[in-house]
Image (spheres, rainbow, N blue to C red):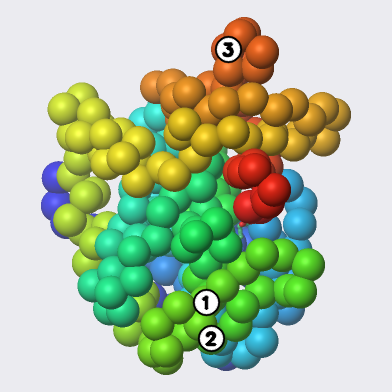
Amino acid sequence: MDPTVWRVEHFDEIDSTNTYVKDRADEPEGLVALADFQTAGRGRMDRSWLSPPRSSLLCSILLTPGLESDQLQLVVALVALSARSALERLSGLRAALKWPNDLVVDGDKLAGLLAEIVSHGNELRVVVGIGVNLTYDGPEDVAATSVLAQTGLTIAPRALLDILLEEIDVRRALLNDVDGRLALREEYVIALATLGQHVRVEQSDETVQGIAVGVDEEGRLRVDVDGVVRTFSVGDVVHVRAGQEQR
Ligand code: BTN
């Protein structure tokens, strides 16, 4: 397979980069929308995602991996792992992943990913949006952090995007065969701070507590709840520690 040709479109202001790329998901892989500011940025579980102009990397990436729906979590994991490596290369900061795909430092949120699946004929395409806090620590009610707060460094969004795309290039071919997907899954599991933690899984209709014991082939979280292992495909996870919680 040929390497992805990245086509970055930069906006001073847009409603949501995810919406923009989703509306153009019939284009070839490699479309990237980058924005200084979003007026209607979207997060997981129907939340909004707001940050002051130029304080974050706000971008969405179109990938056409040719995979089945039960394999698409790996595509999102690929972008999360690439973002983690890009941040480490640029700033030395080593973030962990919190299930499903947040980047966290000591439990505080540094970045979030929003993946949206679009059908194109028989094919499933993936829009992966990512917001990385560069100089903004997030809203008061969220335990969040930024690259600036962690390292004292001010990184330009475009500089991080360029390295992120390089890191995606490094991993992209792994999606094409079984061995590559296994290697990617292994990298994901190693980076996932959630495993082994006492967690609370919050869903719209139910909240449960237990020990996170693994992720299955489809990227679903397996939680031991009082001796019974339950599997979760959506939800917010809170890492519960004695006396403190990490959202
Ligand atoms: C989350 O943690 O809830 C996911 C947040 C994803 C935010 C990014 S910012 C760029 C892209 N455009 C959006 O509207 N959302 C994603």
Q: Residues under labels 3 and 1: Cα distance?
A: 35 Å
Which structural element holds mark 2?
loop
Q: Quadrant of the image for the N terminus?
A: top left
Kindly identify which numbered label has been placed on residue 188: none
Which structural element holds mark 3?
strand
Q: Position of residue 189 (x, y in %)?
A: 35, 36
State whether residue 122 appears in this view: no
**At x 40% / y 82%, what residue is drawn?**
151
> Label 2: few (<14), some or many (≥20) within 10 Å?
many
Please name the residue that numbered disc 3 is placed on.
229
Please name the residue that numbered disc 2 is placed on.
135
Please name the residue that numbered disc 1 is placed on.
146
Q: Please identify the quarter of the rendering in which residue 72 is found.
A: top left
**At x 58% / y 12%, what residue is drawn?**
229
Q: Position of residue 76 (x, y in %)?
A: 43, 46
Which numbered disc flags the more N-terminal residue, 2 or 1?
Answer: 2
Ligand 1: does it lie within 8 Å of the C-beta at label 2? no
Q: Which residue lies most toward the front here?
A: 243
